[in-house]
Image (tube, grey):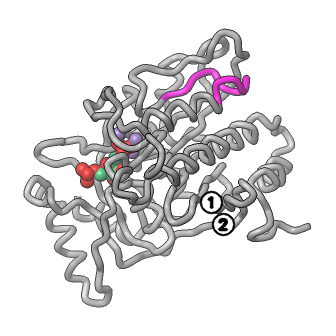
Amino acid sequence: MAIRKGVTNLSRFLLEEQRNFPEATGDFTLILEQIAFAAKIISREVNKAGIVNILGKADSSNIHGEQQQKLDVFANEKMIQALDHTGKICAMASEEVDDIINIPSKYPKGKYLVVFDPLDGSSNIDVNISIGTIFGIYKRVSSEGDGCRQDFMQPGRNLVAAGYVIYGSSTMFVYTTGRGVNGFTLDPSVGEFLLSHENMTTPEFGSIYSINEANYHKWDERIRNYVDHLKNIKERQYTSRYIGSLVADFHRNLLKGGVFLYPGDSKNPRGKLRLLYEASPLAFIVEQAGGLAVDGDNNILDIIPENLHQKTPLIIGSKFEVELFKKYW
Ligand code: AHG
Ligand code: MN
Ligand code: MN
Ligand code: MN
């Protein structure tokens, strides 16, 4: 049976994809399936958030000085629990954990690393606005045993897979292994992610720009000039859309075209977003979909991290808008 929308579930699709890699061992497939499993659990909590005790603040904060939300902590735990026993991974890194996450000694280690932002858009949890999970998978560079911090100091170019989950009006799982981008929509009645967006590509240009304009007076003048220019492109009436959840703003622009910017500013010169588990995975996805992602001077995928939680300015989306940004920068 050919791959068919609405009928092909993620497992079937992963198996078909795996068959294209004769040397594939299935390790990969298992990791992606486990991430999808964690996504189903998180989706269930997100969808009940108003009636179970999962809203509001946890009594902890993370390395970024952010007050953790209960769902940040819950999603982080579910991602770790879904992956730590697989025997396919030698370490993980999460927005919500200061150092790398080692695999408990009772479980075998594998050759992959997983990085993730377990719950993106935390400020939107309690007001029922779309939030997400972002993940990336690398091959280890260290030889054996526990993974180490150095394993994670790889540029996004080395990603072997990346994806995100968006918990919105529907829950979607979108990923790439470097052979295009495919999207699956959760059918809660059967608990399966079903193929809904095959071979996703982003438009060459769009008419949406996403940026938090409250920071306008803190931006570098070149950013102000760029945004003001977009507003004056006569042949295209740009509209501004800003949800405040990176995954939601990214997903809308991926489908409709346009550009998302979280630049540095006078208060936060390197911006707010993190390279390892936000910018790099989304940059891999957008390039696979025909778009582009830069920090201003460099392609995001070429930046080698120096620490797990380093921040980066992020300009990501359709080629036209990002290439135009580079001319302003
Ligand atoms: P996270 O919830 O994982 O910490 O990420 C929040 C990020 C990102 O989702 C969003 O684009 C950005 O914060 C919004 O920041 P501002 O509220 O400063 O615009
Ligand atoms: Mn956060
Ligand atoms: Mn985030
Ligand atoms: Mn987060």
Residue extent of the magenta highlight: 83-93
Residue at 48%, 21% in the rendered image: 100
Whole-percent x and y of residue 196? Answer: 67, 68
Residue that badge 2 annotates: 199
Residue at 32%, 26% in the rendered image: 60
Q: Amino acid at mark 1?
A: Val
Residue that badge 1 annotates: 181
The quadrant in which residue 78 appears is top right
Left or right of 180 on screen, residue 320: left
Whole-percent x and y of residue 70? Answer: 40, 37
Whole-percent x and y of residue 281? Answer: 50, 46
Q: Amino acid at mark 2?
A: Asn
Total residue callouts: 2
Residue at 64%, 32% in the rendered image: 82
Residue at disc 2, secondary structure? loop
Whole-percent x and y of residue 152? Answer: 50, 27
In this view, which residue lies farthest toward the left? 217
